[in-house]
Image (spheres, rainbow, N blue to C red):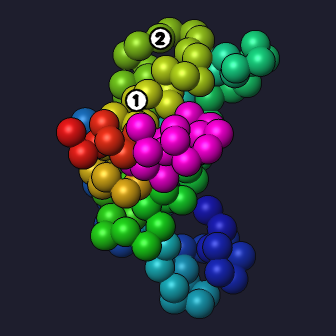
Amino acid sequence: MRCPFCRNEEDKVIDSRAIGEGASIRRRRECLKCGRRFTTYEYIEDAPLMVVKRDGTRKRFDREKIKTGIIKACEKRPVSMERIEEIVEEIERDIQKKSDKEIKTTDIGNVVMEKLYNLDEVAYVRFASVYRRFKDVSHFMKELKKLIE
């Protein structure tokens, strides 16, 4: 494992714990050269799950895309990175349960929206505005009215 700060290859593990019902391991590491700490995650690699995009093309499932979208939606909101990681784990588990080989982007988006709705309403609306491709303010207002009701 390379240190993300100084690129040194030698580190020591300070703490390890199972997350996601034992499906992955979170490790806190300390670089032996610069002394900075960083976190790594280990996951079980299953058969690749393919995502069917709106245009019909297929791509390999990438949890980092989900994480990036959630981080953007939660920007400047009171949501910790640890909670975001937990949600990404939950989403990945839910997606794996729903499908063995392929899943539509719309199904993934719906799972993400459900999790964000329960987490933070502002993050939910932010994500929805991109995911649902709001064309104008009226679409945005319809979503806000649903949220208020």
Q: Secondary structure at mark 2?
A: loop
Label 1 packing within 10 angstroms: few (<14), some (14-19), many (20+): some
Q: Which mark is residue 111?
A: 1
Which residue is depicted at the point 49% across and 20% down?
A: 107
Identity of the residue drawn at 69% across and 21% down: 53
Query: What's under tag 2, amino acid-wise?
Result: Ser
Q: Is residue 13 magenta?
A: no
* Residue 109 pos. (x, y %): 50, 31
Is residue 25 placed above or below 107 in the rendered structure? below
Q: Which residues are magenta?
A: 124-142
Q: Quadrant of residue 112?
A: top left
Q: Residue furthest front?
A: 138
Q: Nearer the viewer, residue 139 or 15?
A: 139
Residue 105 x %, y %: 59, 24
Mark 1 falls on what kind of element? helix
- Left or right: 18 in relation to 58: left
Q: Position of residue 72 (x, y in %)?
A: 54, 59
